[in-house]
């Protein structure tokens, strides 16, 4: 089960960066385009849902494997650093969703939503790249 979860977790990590890029692009279209095409907002919302699902799957598989490998001392600092960064990103994405509702009301709300999202994306990207560099793809 550990190696099956690990493979699922790795595939999720490979999908993460393209989904981040797509979500950022869609968010910028919402902010910059006037008038906004009718497909942009529902697509942004859908991709956000995909991102949320991806993070749920990677959090579940990651935490399960972290627990199962708790006795291992191999790369312990790396694994715990990655885990802490990704859990922080999870919290950031929850916060991003929480402030999303106000984003269509004002520029400051848009900025807040974008900034929380970008901070979360940054933390997640660092956590992901850390594992990729140290352990390979």
Image: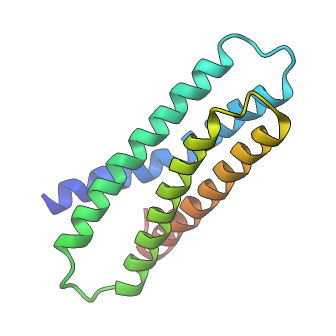
- Foreground: 106 or 79? 106
Quadrant in the picture for the N terminus: bottom left
Foreground of the two, 130 or 85: 85
Q: How many marks?
A: 0
15 left or right of 74 in image: right
Q: Quadrant of the rendered structure where residue 82 is? A: bottom left
Question: Residue sitting at 42 percent across and 81 percent down?
Answer: 78
Coordinates of residue 31 in the picture (x, y in percent): 81, 30
Above or below — where is 94 with respect to 78?
A: above
- Residue positioned 50% across, 64% down in the render: 88
Task: Work out which residue is located at the far bottom of the displayed protein and give it.
Answer: 73
Residue 118 image offset from top left, x and y in percent: 68, 52
Along the horizontal axis of the image, is 52 left or right of 27?
left
Image: 114 above or below 79: above
Q: Residue lying furthest top in this view?
A: 38
Q: Quadrant of the C terminus?
A: bottom left
According to the image, what is the colour scheme of the structure?
rainbow
Instruction: Return the x and y of residue 72 as percentages of the image width and height.
Output: 21, 85
Front position in the image: 40 or 7: 40
Q: Which residue, as the protein is rendered here, is positioned at the far left?
A: 1
Residue located 46% across and 63% down the image: 86
Query: Residue 105: x, y in percent?
Result: 77, 28
Give left or right: position of 60 versus 121: left
On screen, residue 73 versus residue 92, left or right, reads left
Q: Which residue sits at x=23%, y=55%? A: 5
Residue 126 sits in quarter: bottom right
């Amino acid at each position: 089960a550990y190696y099956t979860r690990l493979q699922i977790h790795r595939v999720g990590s490979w999908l993460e960066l393209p989904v981040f890029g797509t979500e950022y692009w869609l968010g910028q279209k919402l902010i910059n385009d006037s008038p906004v095409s009718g497909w942009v907002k529902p697509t942004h919302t859908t991709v956000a849902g995909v991102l949320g699902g991806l993070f749920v799957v990677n959090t579940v598989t990651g935490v399960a494997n972290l627990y199962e490998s708790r006795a291992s001392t191999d790369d312990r600092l790396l694994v715990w650093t990655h885990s802490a960064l990704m859990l922080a990103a999870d919290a950031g994405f929850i916060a991003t969703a929480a402030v999303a509702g106000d984003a269509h009301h004002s520029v400051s709300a848009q900025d807040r939503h974008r900034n929380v999202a970008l901070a979360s994306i940054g933390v997640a990207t660092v956590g992901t790249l850390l594992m990729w560099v140290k352990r390979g793809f």
